[in-house]
Structures are given as structure tokens and as C-alpha cells.
Image (spheres, rainbow, N blue to C red):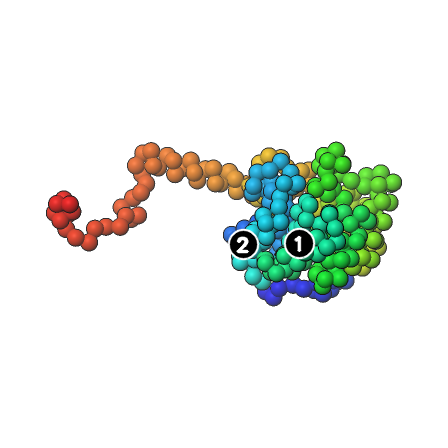
Amino acid sequence: AKKKTIFDLLEMKKKKEKATWVTAYDFPMGSFAEQAGVDMILVGDSLGMVVLGYQGTVPVTMDDCILHCQAVRRGAPNTFVVGDMPFGSYQVSDEEAVRNACRFLKEADADAIKLEGGRRVISKIKAICAAGIVVFGHIGLTPQSSGQMGGFKAQGRDVNSARDLIKDAIAIQEAGARALLLEAIPPELTGFIAEKLTIPVYSIGAGLPCDGQLIICGDMLGLFQAFTPKFVKKYANVGEVIINAFKAYVDDVKNERFPEDKHAYHALDSKEAFEAL
Ligand code: KIV
Ligand code: NA
């Protein structure tokens, strides 16, 4: 299939055709996602938790994100790839935000970047858009600022915080973002925002009424074992498959069932010649 563009994504919103979006962090997962025909891949800074084993996303660096984005792109050359800006890469100044956003396109061939926050990051969104880069917004539960939220907690559940999120969503669109991701907010609020905005609005843990869904590959595949958010549907238990495969291998080796004759490189010279070695 042909790689999606932001115009395709906009067209899908108008036609009420749902967009599908998964995270991936390396070559095989990028390749699997593309083979499955997902519309978009997010190389999320969730890689810090899912593949690097950190407790949160805060320690993830630009270099980490670039490395993983490059690997995903090699696996998924024909899929729309969004690079996720890690904590500290856009907060300090508009200039730094633009410089780091550019790296995703120049070094990792990303199609867009995503950053967290509403009105507090508007100058960054405007600056990155002005550099000619496609920006995705992200509000609701924003893991990089989970300290201020008192942990990984759903947002917008009371009318005051819901109103704040609506203002953020509008400000993000007005700043030039081409899509918005809502994380862990009530479906009622998601529906309101998705109807209010002209840009596509996607959900991760934000319910059905919007333009598409995102899910973290580690969560849906059972690769990430530390915890599973309420909003995750588990489609496979790959972790279990892997553990069982390793166990079977260990058992085979201990009992000399592996390697078998068919796995060996047989000698080309005679047995006698080898005995004289
Ligand atoms: O890093 C990520 O995977 C994300 C999602 C949790 C939205 O930003
Ligand atoms: Na992220």
C-alpha cells in the first residue's frame, strides 16, 4: 500500500474512516506493523519503558529516539512514521525544539513529530510548523509531566479540567498542528473535541468517538510486563511465547536434543583424516 500523507488522514476524518496507529521501536516491529497494514506508526518515547526498562519516559534522549526511529523506518519504508519528541528536547526554547524536530526528518526520515502539552507549548508548535514540519499534538495524560499529575492518571474527568483540555485542543489546532492525540480522557470529552476540531483527533485510552486509535505494541502484544493500563486490549501474549521457547531450548540443550544432525556442517574430508588432526 502507498504511504499515507496528512491529506489522506484528513480525508479519512471527513469520510469517518478510522485510522489505525501502533507504536514500534525497532526493525522487526516496524516491518510487522507495515505488513499488517496499519496507517501510522509512532516511535514513542514509551520505548524507554517498553524496550529500555526505565520506570518512565523522562530519561529517554534524542539519540535514543533517533536510533529507534531509524530502525523502524528501515522496517516500514512505506508507512507514515511519527517521531516522538522526548522530555527535554523541546521544553527549553523554540530554537532547541526546532533543531531537535529537524533531526527526526533529517536523520530518521520521519513524516511528522509529536510533542506533549497544550497552551504551554504553543510557541514550540508554531516554531516547528514554521520550519515546515508536520506536528501532532498530545494532551490528556502526558507521561513526561506525570510528576505534576501525581502519576499516570486519567485527565479531564471533571468539567473544569475538561474545559482546560478543550482550550488546549483548540490552541493546538490554531498553532498549526495537523493532528491531535488524546490520552486517557473520558469518551464524552473526546467526542466533543473530535467534532470541534477540523484536524484528525486520535485516542489512546480516550474512547471510541474520534478519528482513530493508537495502542502501544508492548501492551497489546504482551511484551511489557510491568503493568497494563485499563485502556489496553491484549491481542497476544508474545512474552509468554518467548519464555516458553527459551524454556524449550534450555531443555533441549540440557538433554542433548539440540543441535540435531540436520543442524551440523558435516566434514568434507574422511573420518580418518579428521582423526589424524
Ligand atoms: O510514547 C508513546 O508511546 C506515546 C503514547 C503513550 C501516546 O506517546
Ligand atoms: Na510519548
- Asked if one can make out residue 83 in the rendered structure from this viewpoint, the answer is yes
Which residue occupies the foreground of this view, 104 or 207? 104
Q: What's the amino acid at mark 2?
A: Ala
Circle count:
2
Q: Position of residue 211 (x, y in %)?
A: 74, 55
> Which callout, 1 or 2, points at the residue further toward the start of the chain?
2
Mark 1 crowd level (few <14, some 14–19, many ≥20, 10 Å Cα): many
Q: Is residue 174 left or right of residue 76?
A: right
Q: What's the amino acid at mark 1?
A: Asn
Assign a secondary structure to mark 2. Answer: helix
Q: Position of residue 269 (x, y in %)?
A: 16, 53
Considering only vertical position in the picture, is 258 above or below 192? above
Identify the residue shown where x is 13% and y is 49%.
273
Between the C-alphas of marks 1 and 2, the distance is: 18 Å
Q: Disc 1 designates what residue?
A: 100
Q: Specify whether tag 2 is near ligand 1 (CB below 8 Å).
A: no
- Asked if one can make out residue 79 in the rendered structure from this viewpoint, the answer is no
Identify the residue shown where x is 58% and y is 62%.
78
Which residue occupies the foreground of this view, 102 or 15? 102
Q: Is residue 162 left or right of residue 103?
A: right
Mark 2 crowd level (few <14, some 14–19, many ≥20, 10 Å Cα): many
- On residue 71, the disc is 2
Assign a secondary structure to mark 1. Answer: helix
Q: Position of residue 204 (x, y in %)?
A: 70, 46
